[in-house]
Image (cartoon, rainbow, N blue to C red):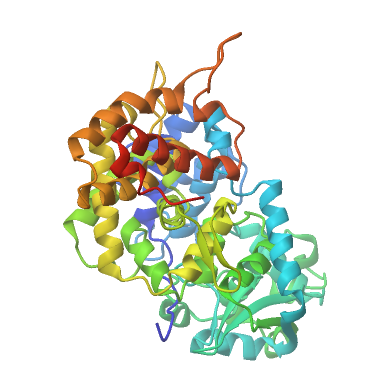
Amino acid sequence: MDAVQEAPLRSVGQIAASVAEVLGIAALDPDEPTAFWKDVAVRVADTYEGQTASEIARWIIEEKFDRDWDPDEALDDETGLPAVSTYEELLDIANRLAPTLAEDEALVEDVIATDEEEEAGSDALAELSEHISSRPVDLGLETVLSNVHRGSLVISPEWQRSYVWKAKRKKRFIESLLINLPIPSILTWMEPKTETEYVIDGRQRLETLVRFCSTREQLAKLHIDEKPFKTFPAKEPLFAPGAQLSEVANKRFDQFADNWKNRLYNQTFRIIRFDRLTRGQLYQVFERYNTGGVQLQAQEIRNAVYQNSTLHRYLWNLAREYADPPPEPDPDIDRIASDLRARMDRKADRYGVYSFIGRVMAFTYFQGGRRHPARGLQSNYSATVASATNDFMDDYEHLDWQELRSKWIRMYDKTIEWYTPDYALVRPSPTKVPFHAFLATVQLATTPHVLEDIDAERTTEAEVIAAVRDLWRDFALNEPTEGATGRVGIVFEKQNSTLFWSAQRRWLQLLRNQLGSGAAAATPAQ
């Protein structure tokens, strides 16, 4: 990929869909937005006040949740309806109200941000520390803005999460600049092939400046569908009549007198540029500097690091994550992505489907070990989930699309068929059948290897189905009982990355032993 475009800001429809999913209400009908806002109000407050979408939105945001409401920013100029920023504010409220999942399986199945992951990151940085190359560059605001508008400095490509700063925080940041408070350094990575610069840390600060100092036409070219915002009104102490900033109270940047414009233009930004890093190394650096108020998850960091990788695009395509332009229609991929997204439910948020497929593929391709570029075959390879996914992204960067596509379609469909709706990708309970990423990974990552046995005529699919249905429940779900002997199900074992690897290898070995000598002989030595 030779260039990366700024991603379109999430639309009203997309943000409203996320709100509807979090709150469990009907989706937004663009022709009847008032009905949506009434549903939101009843869901979060058991009642509502106002007759129009805009009135109800103001009541929810300003009166019920005591948040800033500036009609100039909250409402669309042309329609008078709630603007994108209002839906973003609503989504933040909804996410904070959403009940957290306290089930044990939800806590153990995502071994991503644990202490051992941090230790793995420290080990990786220790290996590369002498090769880290960074250099400070001091740039004026005019230069920074010019780089953003020319596309040489990318602050919000499609792999990044949404801009999350709210109105008060945006205005407070501009206030800080106007009174000459120092700006923390911005960390970037220079992609060597295109010499395009990507923000590692500081995206929210930079985008706030872009949204304040640019014209509406410039913002439109960056796919930011909002008008520039204003400074604080005169009721704020620093903007009060006679106060230090009174001359720029409640004004857009284009309304500033030249001396005030120059005060911002003369601000110097310290840019720390990283280069000479592999993507895996960059991941660790990015993780260290993940300092935003809404911290990025592992898959979001991976999106940032690997966004120019062909394999990243392929996994993104399999997951049918949001992209612009949208991927070409593919009925089988569309069907599977839709099915998996429905099964994962809220775990599909924040690129969850992309993350899960990447994890599954890492465990599939490294099932028999990893051939390290410098160390040779690591037959007992057992990296943490995030590290394994990164290694897969590096080792298989040039994986053929048709190979990946056909493998994914076949392994997914056969897993659903073999394990039946009762057990496929889930941990059953008396009241519900929740998606379980750990068990789903073991199932899916094992299936391609069993399919190889079927293709080589070492066993038959009928024998595989019988073995799966005979063995899986005890292997995965056998509950510990006091005084009993024998192995308990894998969901009751100590949850860590070692179990992720050993469980799928043990499951494949158990199946092959059940299937007979031909299949058992295919198991690689560990």
**In this figure, what is the number of numbered marks?**
0
**Measuring 67% from the left and 86% from the top, which residue is drawn there?**
141
> Is 286 situated left or right of 152 in this image?
right
> Is 320 situated left or right of 239 in this image?
left
Occupied quadrant, residue 257: bottom right
Percent across and percent down for residue 315 are: 37, 62
Residue 422's place in the image compared with 371, above or below, is: above
Percent across and percent down for residue 108 are: 57, 36
Percent across and percent down for residue 372 are: 55, 68
**Of all residues shown, which one is farthest toward the top?**
483
Residue 356's place in the image compared with 4, above or below, is: above
The residue closer to the viewer here, 466 or 235, is 466
Q: Quadrant of the N terminus?
A: bottom left
The residue closer to the viewer here, 308 or 233, is 308
The residue closer to the viewer here, 291 or 408, is 408
**Measuring 67% from the left and 55% from the top, which residue is drawn there?**
293
Tell me, yes or no, if residue 378 can be seen here.
yes
> Is 523 situated left or right of 169 in this image?
left
Percent across and percent down for residue 194 are: 49, 89
Tell me, yes or no, if residue 102 can be seen here.
no
